[in-house]
Image (cartoon, helix red, strand yellow):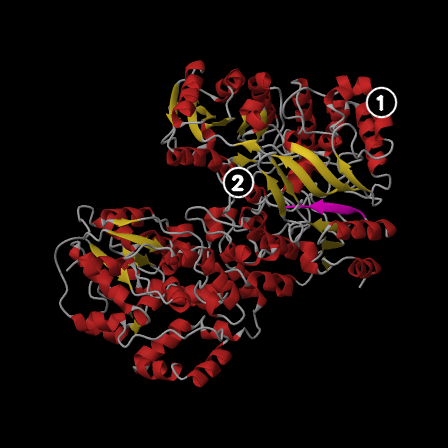
Amino acid sequence: MTDLEAALRRAVRGEVGFDTTSRALTTMDASNYRRVPLGVVAPRDADDVAAVLEVCREHAVPVVARGGGTSIAGQATGTGVVLDFTRHMNRLVGIDPEARTAVVQPGVVLDRLQDAAAPHGLRFGPDPSTHSRCTLGGMIGNNSCGSHSVAWGTTADSVRELSVLTARGRRLRLGREWSGAPEGLRGLVDGELARLRTGFPDLPRRISGYALDALLPERGADVARSFCGSEGTLGVLTEAVVRLVESPRARALAVLGYADEAGAAEAAAGLLPLGPLTVEGMAVDLVPSTRGLPRGGAWLFVETGGDTEAEARARAEAVVRAADVVDALVVTDPGGQRTLWRIREDASGTATRMPDGSEAWPGWEDCAVPPVRLGGYLRDFRRLLTAHGLRGTPYGHFGDGCIHVRIDFDLLSADGVARFRRFSQELADVVVAHGGSLSGEHGDGQARAELLPRMYGAETVALFERAKAVWDPDDLLNPGMLVRPAPLDANLRFSVLPREPVDVEFGYPSDGGDFSAAVRRCVGVAKCRTTSVSGAGVMCPSFRATGEEAHSTRGRARLLHEMLAGELVTDGWRSTEVRDALDLCLSCKGCRSDCPVEVDMATYKAEFLHHHYAGRRRPAAHYAMGWLPVWLRWTARTRTAPVVNALASVRPLAAVAKRLGGIAREREVPRLAGETFSRWWRRRGERPTEGGDLVVLWPDTFTEHLSPTVGRAAVRVLEAAGLRVALPPTLRGRAVVGDGTSRSPLALLTARRGKVCCGLTYVSTGQLDRARAVMRRTLDLMAPVLETSAPVVVLEPSCAAALRTDLPELLHDDPRAARLAARVLTFAEALERHAPDWAPPEVNLPAVGQTHCHQHAVLGDAADRRLRESAGLTGELSGGCCGLAGNFGFEAGHYEVSAACAEDQLLPAVREAPDGAVVLADGFSCRTQLEQLAGVRGRHLAEVLAERLD
């Protein structure tokens, strides 16, 4: 233990982490930069913060304040001690509805404040796109804005008072009329009044540099406002009093279509006198489909408010009349507005990658110019991109002249980094020429601070340095930011990654087969750190259950990054830090769809486990549940299911078996079916030989051995819809498609018997060699099916997802894998595509339950929604993950997290279900979780429909 660590442990009551994991989780924010801290402290209160500052001052170690870690300019990283405010100093202290103020600690997430203010008809004005995970402390540090800044301004406009600790331990209460000003600040300002009145651009989104002009006497000498945007370099925030605004009772959305981006940009400023709440813009190159949008090549999204829907609509229609548009649309229905806003919000996710899937990076994410000059600036910006051979897709807050863009910089090669520097310098000059600010929302950090002399001039930047010295004479707080900055091309997080491809098992087709590129996907925006999900969202259940960064998708990606770097995590694939972080990953695949850059942590986990345990003994659960298809087939072959069920019902025997198998003692062992689905199929005899399309029904392990009633129900429904059902061949050789086996004497003599399997249990436990062997055997068995046009209908969503994605990505060298993946359909998709004229039986009941996480992430549920609607099953299914997630919830040590995941969405939805509601759960894991935690029987949609066929 170092002297610094020991001193901090003695001085503070909060957690002190100098271990590898704690440090690795905070090496990066959402920027291009990386710094390795000495340690991390989670202070419990202001006294702890004061103690940390005292210890670090004695040891001459810098301190960096960190909230949600979503900053994109590098200001939330540092080489000293990082203060993590999200763990303890995250309270909403109180709300005063009469005064329209709230008192918050720096670690409180914005959405929590919004939720608390909403019942009073109030809200916090600024709303960055990261509102579900960014903290008020970070917003104050960066002077964040958001899409409603045309109505409610920046965070600085919403700050009343700030409680701050200086680096030398002084406790200040900052406010207007010099309240809380450190000694020397007023004298500094009094000597520079002329510069402060003339040297700062006048535009709504000027975030760059220190806001020293807020200290002018005619502006109320507002020390709190001046502190906003200082990026943790002047003092450490411990509490804030913020202003709330009245939230409009009704809103309308006008979507205005223009011929091109420049036309939309030039029109935006003219709409501001009409008092809109937002004026957001984007062009067609960010929109996968223009369906639902008015005609045009670019659009403005203009939101208006009012006390009534009619008033909001009238204001929106006035906007349309005032705008010279190609086409327009006004929507007052909240659902319709959400749909349209989703197009705009999805654009920000699309912008993190180029249309061809190649990488794009921040760095010039949020320059701002006067709104009236936005059109000309965008044209110059596009020309500069072309001149440097770069690509980017601008979008953003057109009403404030603030543009977001990610650019396909090559930050891996020396030439690419040199071009990044040249482009940055030239773009800074373009921004300044248009009277703009290098930062219009996210701060300067390391990305832009070096270029501040181009915007302010050397003398004003020297004034910034003098102001920093007044507040922090020892340069203890976040050094290298804003003043005396590190070069903009230093500390790039990509520089530590291996240049040669890493030897891996999966194909990573979206990343050119490069595992390093796959890990680089995580840009740190931390959507996985949201504490609640909306709609059918899934990511990230383990973070919501634990609240710990290590168990978020971003945290795991950071550890993998450091594993590849080899500087902090030094034992590569054998790393216990990475293993422990991945241990609570449910492999739900939610991040594959919900993450803006489609990080696929389930695949990364399988890859890691494969290498981690190569040549070593695995955990018992990997053998017990990874090889589940084998054990169940042996049981079926020996017809010993009744014996196994009887033994499992004897508690002492079950306890011993669970301990030996690495199974959680809290879990009940599921009962095996007395008759497998395939055996029922053979016993059933007569099957239709004429009629509709042939479909091959996949007998997955769960349907085959644990819930064959689902398979029997699916057969009934598919045949009722006029389809001919077959099972996959069980002989490798000249098998016959149509009866699930082969009766050819020659085939019986020359072929080998087998059962198809998707390999899911082997993949999820990282036994990829075994998974590959199982998948190749399956492809051999399915060869006759692939010679037909028959689709493969898979009832278990996790198995369908494995066939769609894991199969072609693991067997990327076998063209049959992609062909089989393309044939896979869900139960609802098969009915919709191959029996389009069939009407399902009427159920006419409310439905509750959960969309399977793999279905949400990989397969999609649009066909299921339409089938439920046709059958009269009303209501929305919840999002999230059931928490059992295949082997995860059965493994020893996972029960508490598994149950917490179920309590997040699934169990509350079932408890609140109306009388007579149908509980839908297409996944065996979901049905098992419902039964074991709630005593509720969930049913596959096929079972519900089959029951009504009579």
Q: Position of residue 113 (x, y in %)?
A: 57, 42
Q: Are marks 1 and 2 in contact (CB under 8 Å)?
A: no
Badge 2, how many Cα within 10 Å: few under 14, some, many 20+?
few
Circle 1 sits on which residue?
190
Q: Secondary structure at mark 1?
A: helix
In which quadrant of the rendered view does residue 362 lie? Answer: top right
Image height check: is 49 above or below 782?
Answer: above
Task: Tell me the number on the disc at residue 358.
Answer: 2
Numbered circles on residues, count:
2
Q: Position of residue 298 (x, y in %)?
A: 45, 24
Amino acid type, residue under disc 2 in the picture = Ser
- As for residue 65 lying within the magenta part, the answer is yes
Residue at (66% x, 41% y) in the render = 138
Amino acid type, residue under disc 1 in the picture = Asp
Residue 526 is left or right of residue 657, and the answer is right
The stretch of residues the image draws in magenta is 62-68
